[in-house]
Image: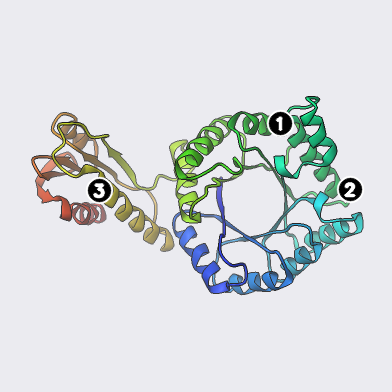
Amino acid sequence: MSVQTMCNLDPHDAEAIAAQANASAALGCDIFRLTVPDVEAAKTLGEVKKLTLVPLVADIHFDYLCALAALENGADALRLNPGNIGSMDRVQAVARAAKSKGVPIRIGVNMGSLQKDLAEKVRAGGSSPAEALCESALRQLAVLEGEGFRDVVISAKASGVADTLAAYRLLAERTDCPLHLGVTEAGTFLPGTVRSSVALGVLLSEGIGDTLRVSLTDRPEREVRVGAEILRSLGLRAAGPSITSCPTCGRTKVDLMSVATEVEEALERLYAERLAKGEAGGFPHVAVMGCAVNGPGEAKGADVALCGGDGDFVLYVKGEPVGRVAGSDAAREVVKHVVSL
């Protein structure tokens, strides 16, 4: 199961794009998409290819020449809607070029890109959004299959959870093509994370989906973190940093929120370093607790734990207390012991 994100930088700045792709890969991104609005951007994609190992998807709208140029410059996949790149001969040209290079095409439809007759059908109440999305995607699939092109991935995204669930369930019934999951225009970090987690979690638990993107009004790196965490929570990706932390209460006498966040970020950096070296494997369970009510009990089950006291923390390793640490030293001490395990 693969996590995808999309570049949000100038499509002509190869060094910046590659840096973002590599930073995303370090956090668990498997596929990196970038917009190709013109032929110059396709050439930039070729430069990015030299600076990153992450597979690159060229996002194409309207101009089939951009798709052809992206293929010539080494795109690993195309994302397009065959219906918006013009006449059939243009669709044929893209399909033939992609087939000759062994490059897959993702058909991407959403409520904003429905064909006019389908959009009108939804407005008139003659079709549900999910039915329209599914029909639109299958129409586009038929166009490519008519050209003998079958290396296809489909996405059919809505901005609401219920429509997203319904659309992908219909697609899973009606085609055996791989499906790319996502809630489009999901929103800013908190609501977007919640909507995406609910929709994608349900679909994945039903065995639906092959790749995903958590679409947030935020940095691509944050999208990757959420997507990877969704997969971890369902056992669909090797466990990374596993952190248990309490919600705090009136008994808490340490700055638990800051310390827990600092520990989490430090462990994610360590995990990224291990990934880059091919050494990720399993990862110790860390607990960051605020007081003596639940803290010691959680510490017994964690590999490394911090239990808040009166202004500082008791540090546990493998269930045994090994000393006290100040909040300012807590993250460093946790990482030191995690590395030694």
Amino acid bearing label 2: Gly
- Residue linked to disc 2: 146
- Residue linked to disc 3: 258
Nearest to the eye among marks 3 and 2: give it: 3
* 262 shown above or below 124: below
User: Distance from label 1 to label 3 (Cα)?
Assistant: 42 Å
Amino acid bearing label 3: Ser
* 132 shown above or below 150: above
Q: What percent of the width, then of the height, locates residue 87?
A: 90, 55
Q: Quadrant of residue 125?
A: top right
Asked if residue 268 lies left or right of residue 298, the reply is right
* 164 shown above or below 305: above
Mark 3 / mark 2, whichever is N-terminal: 2
Mark 1 / mark 2, whichever is N-terminal: 1
Q: How is the image coloured?
A: rainbow
Q: From the viewer's side, name the closer residue of 72 and 176.
A: 72
Q: Residue at x 32, y 53 (%)?
A: 265
Q: Residue at x 14, y 32 (%)?
A: 251
Q: From the viewer's side, name the closer residue of 158 and 282.
A: 158
Q: From the viewer's side, name the closer residue of 170 and 59.
A: 59
Mark 3 surroundings: few (<14), some (14-19) or many (≥20) residues within 10 A: few
Q: What percent of the width, then of the height, locates residue 105?
A: 73, 53
Q: Give the structural element (helix, strand or loop) at label 1.
A: helix
- Residue linked to disc 1: 130
Asked if residue 319 lies left or right of residue 148, the reply is left
Q: What percent of the width, then of the height, locates residue 82?
A: 81, 51
Q: Count the marks: how many?
A: 3
